[in-house]
Each structure stands twice: as C-alpha cells, then as structure tokens.
Image: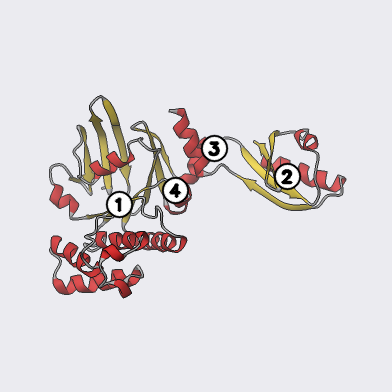
Amino acid sequence: MNAIEVNNLTKQFGDFTAVDHLDFEVENGEIFGFLGPNGAGKTTTARMLTGIIKPDSGQVKIKGIDIQRNPIKAKQIIGVVPELSNAYTDLSAWNNLQFMAQLYGIPKKEAKQRAEELLMMLDLYERKDHKVKTFSKGMKQKLILAMSLMNDPEILFLDEPTSGLDVRSARLIKDMLLELNKEGKTIFLTTHDMEEANQLCNRIAVINHGNIAAIDAPEKLKMRIGGLKWIEISFNMPVDFSDLHAMQGIVEVQKSGDKLRLYTDEPGRIVYQLVDYSRLNDLEIMTLNTMTPTLEDIFIKLTEEI
C-alpha cells in the first residue's frame, strides 16, 4: 500500500482547468517533491490531497483511506505545514501546541512531553511562553512545523517550508525533515527551491498547466531530459575562444565570470583535448569541472515544453 495514491484527479474553476486528470503515487517513506511554476496547479493539488477542497472528479487515498469518504480517519495520520502561518498569534507557542494536542485527543502528559521535545528540537523552547505575534517569520514557520508534528503523523505535507527564512533556520528545518524521513515518515514537499528539492527528494513530479510533465528521481531526470553537459575551466592566462571552438565535440563556448563554459556531448573526450591544449600552449589549468544540467535547467525545459 502506497502512502498516497492519486487517480484521475481533476479540479476546475469556471472554465479554467487547474488540475487535469492527475495520476501518481507517493511511496511509503520517501520525500516526494512537487514542483511547478505559479498557476501550474501545485497548491490546488496539495489542497485536494489534504482534504481542504474537493475534486470535481478522481480519488485521493491516504494509506488506503479515501480522503473524501473518510476525511477524519485520513486526516488523523497526516500533518500539514501551509506556506502562510496559521498559528494563533495571541496565544503562546506552548498554548498553540497544547491546542493542537486537544484537537487530536492527545493525553495531557503525552502532549506536554511531545511539545517540550519539539520546541527543543526546533530551538524555540526559550520562547515557549511568548505570544506568537512577537515571533519572526522563521520562528513562526518552525512553530507551524512543531504544530503539524504534535499528532506524530505518518505523512507530512509541506508547502514552501523554508520560503523567506534565513540560512540557519532553513538548514535547521531541512535537517529536521531528513531526520523525520529517516524515522520512516513520508514527506510531500511543495517547493520553488530547486536546490532544496535536489537535496531532499527521492523523487520529484513537475506539474505544468495542471498536467504532470515528468516524474522521477532528480538524477534520472537530469540524465533523461538534461541534454548537453558542459565543462567549466579556467586557465592562468587568457585564451583564444577560436582555439576552443575548433576542438572536436564542442558545441558552444561561453564566458562565465573568470571561467569558460564549454558545452558538449562528450565531456571525457574534451577533457583530454584541454589537457593537451594547455601543454602545447604552456598554460596552467586552474580549475576544471565537468557539469551536468541542474534540476533548475530541467524544470525550465519541462515547463517551457508544455
């Protein structure tokens, strides 16, 4: 049984089809990235998966439970971290967590222990008695994550969890997500941050115009869709572009800061030619890196093609 199963999921707003007959599965214990440009259908899909809005057609199953037919049972095993804070700003961090515990029927002793653990883990314990309206955006985001974990969910849905956070807070949340995943939690991550998706996700789906453009492991997508590779090189002295263009197998040469970027389908062959070229011209190679297309390159290519 998969953690999430989506079949023929469709949602329209008037004449606009936001989500168009989606089919995909999220396996137990994976971090699944859901990427797409603004207006592609990401948020609408996530809201249907978590039971916030109803689809016009299709089905969502959470651990085999139909979220439309048994919403309470399904929601008991998920946690949701929305992009915008939904904590009660006039309550303290501690009272927000205790309120969540009451909603889920968690016994007081267990709720107290769980809240202490989460606040310590997220570096919020010293501020536990402060009202949320005094918190920074990063602190609010960490509190929302703590609130979503109070019921110890099997599946965690996150919408842009590190958006707008400082580097330290973003890293803390990413490290925590990896730790939660190691403990067996399935994570459904909606993000605009390509590097974040590349670091965290076992698989990603790219949605565009309400359709899945591609779905696979990040590295497999890079290999399958990526196209040209490139070599980034810098020498100790300026070189003639025409010499590099003349090398067999080089498609294009671009300047990138103090480095040169050589596009090719045969990076191994080009490296040998560059070494020979540097010897013949009494040059020293300062840096040399073989690069593959980034997840951002793949994202742009996929969302331009549909």
Q: Nearer the viewer, mark 4 or mark 1?
A: 1
Mark number, residue 218: none
Question: x and y percent of residue 79 in the render?
Answer: 25, 55
Q: CA–CA distance between discs 4 and 2?
A: 32 Å
Sequence-wise, the earlier of marks 1 and 3 is 1
Secondary-structure class at tag 2:
helix
Secondary-structure class at tag 4:
loop
Q: Nearer the viewer, residue 44 or 205?
A: 44
Mark 2–mark 1 CB contact (< 8 Å) = no
Colouring: secondary structure
Question: Residue under circle 3?
Answer: 226
Q: Nearer the viewer, mark 4 or mark 2?
A: 4
Q: CA–CA distance between discs 2 and 1?
A: 48 Å
- In the picture, residue 6 is in which quadrant? top left
Mark number, residue 193: 4
Disc 4 marks a residue whose amino acid type is Asp
Secondary-structure class at tag 3:
loop
Residue farthest to the top, as pictured: 15
Mark 1–mark 3 CB contact (< 8 Å) = no
Q: Is residue 195 above or below residue 227?
A: below
Mark 4–mark 1 CB contact (< 8 Å) = no
Secondary-structure class at tag 1:
loop
Q: CA–CA distance between discs 4 and 1?
A: 17 Å
Disc 1 marks a residue whose amino acid type is Leu
- In the picture, residue 15 is in which quadrant? top left
Total count of labels: 4
Q: CA–CA distance between discs 3 and 4?
A: 18 Å
Q: Residue at x 31, y 61 (%)?
A: 140
